[in-house]
Image (cartoon, rainbow, N blue to C red):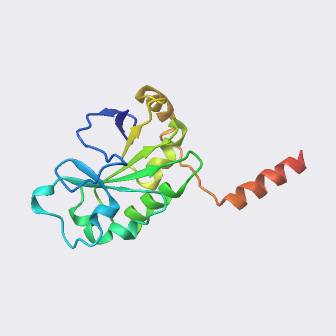
Amino acid sequence: MALINHLGEELPDRWLYPQPETDAIPAPYTVVPAEALQGLERLPPDARPVGVLLRPEQSADLIAPLLDELDVVVVLFEKFRDGRGFTIAHALRNKHRFMGDVRAIGHLLPDQLPLLRQCGFTSIVTPAEHPPARWRNGNATQDQRVQAKPLLQRLMNNRSSDHGA
């Protein structure tokens, strides 16, 4: 897995990501699960820079009190079809005004790069099956704005066009 920025350019990655079977504690260049920060009012001063991992079922509100102390928020995409990560990134940027790195990790496709960028992601840990070169090739649509629509509206539009043909 490689780290790329929102333009598809490869970056060095010195962050350590949490393993499911370990209890991570805040330490420099370590991403810890959001649960590890629950109940903390402040992060230990020697922990910076530190990041947090948000799972799809978690809200950005969970880490809001600590956002000023976080350097990176990693948003997990457990499935290709689960769009909750986009909502989390949007909330981090627009509701909480988080200015740090919002990083996507998990099941992602290069075709999603424009939407990832639009929702506020600044970096992506690319899945092994989609190396950085594929993300750079998909960056040709960089200037196109993706218009996200509610699922019901998209389905109704598809149904209307199917019956009109």
Q: Residue 6 versus residue 80: which sits nearer the camera? A: 80
Q: Residue 31 versus residue 149: which sits nearer the camera? A: 31
Q: Position of residue 20 (x, y in %)?
A: 37, 48
Quarter containing the N terminus: top left
Name above or below for residue 41 compared with residue 5.
Answer: below
Residue ID at (50%, 36%): 110
Numbered disc total: 0
Instruction: Using the rendered view, name the quadrant where residue 127 is placed.
Output: top left
> Residue furthest toward the left?
46
Residue ID at (52%, 38%): 109
Name above or below for residue 64 compared with residue 76.
Answer: below
Q: Is residue 98 visible?
A: no
Q: Position of residue 131 (x, y in %)?
A: 43, 28
Q: Where is residue 158 in the image (x, y as percent from the top left)?
A: 78, 51
Name the side, left or right, on which 145 lies relative to 52.
right
Q: Where is residue 58 in the image (x, y as percent from the top left)?
A: 44, 64
Name the side, left or right, on which 10 lies relative to 42.
right
Name the side, left or right, on which 19 lies relative to 127.
left
Q: Can residue 9 be seen in this view?
A: yes
Quarter containing the C terminus: top right
Q: Residue 131 versus residue 24: which sits nearer the camera? A: 24
Residue ID at (41%, 47%): 104
> Residue furthest toward the top?
133
Residue ID at (63%, 58%): 149
Q: Residue 66 versus residue 136: which sits nearer the camera? A: 66
